[in-house]
Amino acid sequence: MGITMKPLVRLFFRTLRRVIGPIMLFIDWLTTPKGIQRPLKEQEKINQNTQNMALYQFKTCPFCIKVRRHTKRLSLNIETRDAQHDPTSRAQLVTGGGALKVPCLKVTNEAGEDHWMYESDDIIHYLNSQFGQDHFNNQSHATRH
Ligand SMILES: N[C@@H](CCC(=O)N[C@@H](CS)C(=O)NCC(=O)O)C(=O)O
C-alpha cells in the first residue's frame, strides 16, 4: 500500500470504531450470544487450554466484537488485552505479533513459544477447530442453552 494511503486507512477505521463501535457494543449487549454448556470436566479442561491464550483487541473495533461474540458462543474464558489504551499490551502486540492490528490472538504452546494470529476470520476458524461443537460433539454431548 502506498505510503499516502496508510493515514487514510487509519482514519477510516478510527471513524468506523467511533461511529459504528458504540452502536455495535449496544447491539452486542442486547443480543449477547448464549454460550454452549458443557459437562463440567470438559469445560475445566477447556479453561485450562484457554489460559494459554490472550486476545489483543480494541473495545469498539467491529472485528474484535465479532471475535469476542464468538468466544462467548463457545463459552471460552480468554483473557482480553486492551491494545488501544494499555501501553504494555500495545507494546507486546507490536513487538510479539509484528503489527498494531487487532484482533490478534496470542497462543502460547507447551514449549512456551508464542504464536500470534491476526485476522478475525482466521481466529474464529482456529477457535472452532479447537473448541467448536463439531470438535467436541465427537467426544461428549454438549448442549447449547
Ligand atoms: N481483516 C482484519 C481487519 C482488522 C482491522 O482492520 N482492525 C483495525 C481496527 S478496527 C486495526 O487494527 N487498525 C489498526 C489501527 O487502528 O491502528 C480482520 O478481520 O481482523
Image (tube, rainbow, N blue to C red):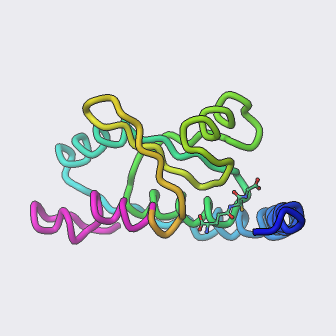
Picture residue at 74% right of the left edge, 43% below the top: 84
Q: Position of residue 79 (x, y in %)?
A: 50, 40
Picture residue at 38% right of the left edge, 55% below the top: 75
Q: Position of residue 55 (x, y in %)?
A: 53, 46
Residue 137 falls inside the magenta stretch: yes
Residue 74 figure quarter = bottom left
- Quadrant placement of the C terminus: bottom left
Would residue 134 appear left or right of 118 to someone viewing this image? left
- Which residue occupies the extreme front position in the image? 2
Residue 23 figure quarter = bottom right
29 above or below 101? below
99 above or below 69? above
Picture residue at 53% right of the left edge, 64% below the top: 120
The range drawn in magenta is 123-145
Q: Position of residue 92 (x, y in %)?
A: 60, 33
In front of the other: 110 or 124: 110
Q: Position of residue 38 (x, y in %)?
A: 24, 56
